[in-house]
Image (cartoon, rainbow, N blue to C red):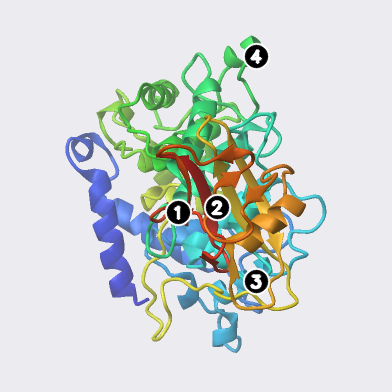
Amino acid sequence: MSRMSTTRLLAASIAALALAPAAAHATTTPAALTTSVTNATTYVKGLQDPTTGAFASTGLSNEWAFSALAPAGVAAVDLLPPPPNNVVSKNARKVYRDYLSPASWPGGSPVVTDYERATLNAYSAGIDPARVAATRNLIADIASYWQTASPGYWGTPGNFNGTVFGLLALAGAKTAAGAQRVPQTLLNKSITTVRANQHTDGGWNWTKAEGVPAQLAAVSDIDMTGATLASLCVSGVANTDSAVVAGKNFLKGKLVNATGAFNSSFGANTDSNGWGVQGLNACGIANQGADFTTAMGKTPIDFLVSQQLAGGGFRYTTGSTPNAYASIDALRAEAGGGFSATPPVPTTVGEPRFVASTSFVSGTTSKLAVIVDDGSGTLKVCSVSVAPTTATTTLGAVLTAAVSGSTPAGCVTGSSPSSGVITTINGVTNSGGSTWKASIDNGTAAAANTATGVSLGDTISLKYGV
């Protein structure tokens, strides 16, 4: 993308952040913010490995750059390392896709946040998270961490951040056509869980608080409150909702009068301010509005800009050395992003906004996400492994595979008949006007039929009702 087109995109997105009355009281003007974002974009683009073209690597790497560069108007596929490695095969999107694709990734003992982080960044990079490759369906990977005994939680319930980022990933990573790929009933289960974990001071923390009075009364965390606000709003909760308002007021109450920083338990720092602002951005709350301008005229954006160094990077707290992670968080916040963003249209000729694998590969095991709603209010969610010998498979074959084994277990215990219209799933049989219906990627529901075609990466929803 040319400097001119980048500047235009930045100016358009940033203008929305500086509308009156916010701009009338903020010390960071729209022009100054545009300059800051432009310089930060240059710095973050420079984090690309000059040899391989990668942003992601083992450990805490720079893969969050994708969700920061996208709202700044930079498509991952347009990013090449410098000469002599500036070849198409080393563009950042392809390298990241290749990184996520092997069945062995992420190795070790993965946790749900590994897949949630990858989902948010793959989507921002222009990779369909459900169709990274025949060997990688990140949506199904997340589905395997559904907590049957604690519905609404993703991953170990004690690690509440897994549930927050589950919501962010499943609601934020749309289909290539821009549609929500999972049913709202599934998101609502986790929304209810998020509400139950809200502390009495209005914010949230990293650990589970539901049912634990001491945790509910504990002081909340700036970072986690920002992320949780974003998870609610991206899932359809209005910014006038009482939970969102209470979270906003918690952040407001943590503003440092002289700087506009959020008074984090880690001290005033760029990352916490970035996450707090990202929550406000996702909820459509002005980050330089009256609620977030101190008596001394300082805003959270003022603090972020004050942390920026001459080369465009940001320091974490003080000093003269830029911190990559802090710089990524600051750019995402300043560019108006939440925790993911729809990728911009690439400037590279012939490159689509999204890439995806579309066919099963014979001899390769693939995963599909399955959601079963029998109308009782209890959902079953799982990942099902299939190994078709053809490019597509059928709903009947998926259900057969699910009965044989799913993660978590027991998602589908049985279905009948073995061919044609499906009348019974998990012991619940069509009766009166209530029938089993199936939808793909949360699309139009139709009578569940064993012959219904299923493609690689499809999210399958089965619902019983009128």
Residue 41 can be seen in this image: yes
Marks 2 and 4: in contact by CB < 8 Å? no
* Residue receiving disc 1: 447
Q: Of the residues tagged 3 and 4, which is closer to the observer? A: 3
Marks 2 and 1: in contact by CB < 8 Å? yes
Q: CA distance from mark 3 to mark 4?
A: 42 Å
Give SS at disc 2. Answer: loop
Dot 1 or dot 2, earlier in sequence:
2
Q: CA distance from mark 1 to mark 2?
A: 8 Å
Q: Amino acid at mark 2?
A: Ile
Q: Of the residues tagged 2 and 3, which is closer to the observer? A: 2
Nearer the observer, 363 or 107: 363
Describe residue 447's horizontal placement relative to residue 316 as left or right: left
Q: Amino acid at mark 4?
A: Val
Work out whether 292 lies above or below 134.
above
Nearer the observer, 239 or 78: 239
Q: Of the residues tagged 1 and 4, which is closer to the observer? A: 1
Dot 3 or dot 4, earlier in sequence:
3
Horizontal and vertical percent position of residue 447: 45, 53
Q: Of the residues tagged 4 and 2, which is closer to the observer? A: 2
- Few, some or many C-alpha atoms within 10 Å of disc 2 (few <14, some 14-19, many ≥20)? many
Q: Quadrant of the N terminus?
A: bottom left
Rendered residue at 52%/32% (across/down): 189
Nearer the observer, 435 or 104: 435
Q: Amino acid at mark 1?
A: Ala
Q: CA distance from mark 2 to mark 3?
A: 27 Å
* Residue receiving disc 3: 134
* Residue receiving disc 2: 422
